[in-house]
Amino acid sequence: MRLRDKLIQLKAEKKAILAANFYNFETLSGILRASSNLRIPVILQLSESSIRYMGLTVATAMAKAAIKEYAVDAWLHLDHGSSIEIVKRCLDEGFDSVMIDASEKSLDENIEITYQVVKIAEGYDANVEAELGFVAKLGQKQNEQEFTQPADATRFVKSTGVNALAIAIGSAHGFYKQAPKLDIELLARINNNIYTPLVLHGSSGIPDAMLQEAIRNGICKINLATETKNTFMLALKERLKNNSEIDLRIVFPDATQTVIELIEKKMKIIYQA
């Protein structure tokens, strides 16, 4: 099944799918082993930073081989593509889905760039995600005045034909300095205005009940990144305390196990909504 068809199905059923970023083989295998254990589909995400770190061809081949090895339903997605060039490169490598993020540009510019990507992706039969409104990135402050507005969302999806839309309703990338509060009422109004599946970025640290309420009100894809790498690194640091072991094949598995446990927990939360 194509990812865009899966997202439409999830929207109709008022359900969601986890989209998890991976950074190396260990986090990749942790995500897919959790998916295999629970028999729940997953979206694998690569950011531009991870692509620069691993190399696009290597990262893509590793993801595709791992999906086959673990025999899971999974799709490969570019997270926060900053340019048409990186989108095209990922599509050429066989990505199932790409995100073009022109959210910090004007609405008209965002529409124009997203429309171009949608047209390019048609030739690859690939899913396209875009972002509308301002979802704070690391070090940035969230402002309610920059939340996605229903009228803008309607204009955006009609003008671009985008397959999935990430919206700003109070979430943020990275860790929260204070308890997050999603604007569920705004989410519901956006969801009632458009048929396009909606995406929530910045789920790390959002309370379980709030995530589930967001799903019931239209969120179909939930991104997870910060919590995964933090979980892995904390476990690895603990494993290396007062330890002279130099074999990474011995010390990495403990950290990978914590990723499996985290992803399984998130998947259960999402599928119980």
Image (spheres, rainbow, N blue to C red):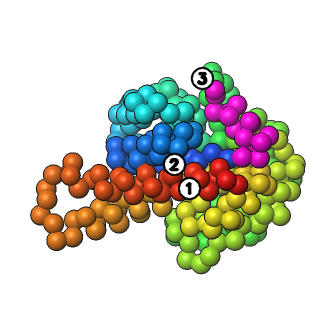
Residue at which label 3 appears: 124
Q: Nearer the viewer, residue 230 or 126?
A: 230
Q: Mark 3 and 1 residues: CB-CB less than 8 Å, in contact?
A: no
Percent of width and height locating residue 250: 20, 52
Q: Nearer the viewer, residue 102 or 268?
A: 268
Residue at which label 2 appears: 20
Q: Is residue 82 visible?
A: no
Query: Residue drawn 70% across and 31% down?
Result: 5
Q: Range of the magenta residues?
A: 1-15
Percent of width and height locating residue 25: 34, 43
Q: Is residue 269 left or right of residue 67?
A: right
Residue at which label 1 appears: 266
Secondary structure under the numbered disc 3 in the rendered image: loop
Q: Which circle, 2 or 1, is nearer the viewer?
A: 1
Percent of width and height locating residue 255: 33, 57
Quadrant holding the N terminus = top right
Q: Which circle, 3 or 1, is nearer the viewer?
A: 1
- Whole-Å distance between the Cαs marked 2 and 3? 23 Å
Quadrant holding the C terminus = bottom right
- Indicate which disc, 2 or 3, sits on the residue closer to the N terminus: 2
Q: Is residue 247 visible?
A: yes
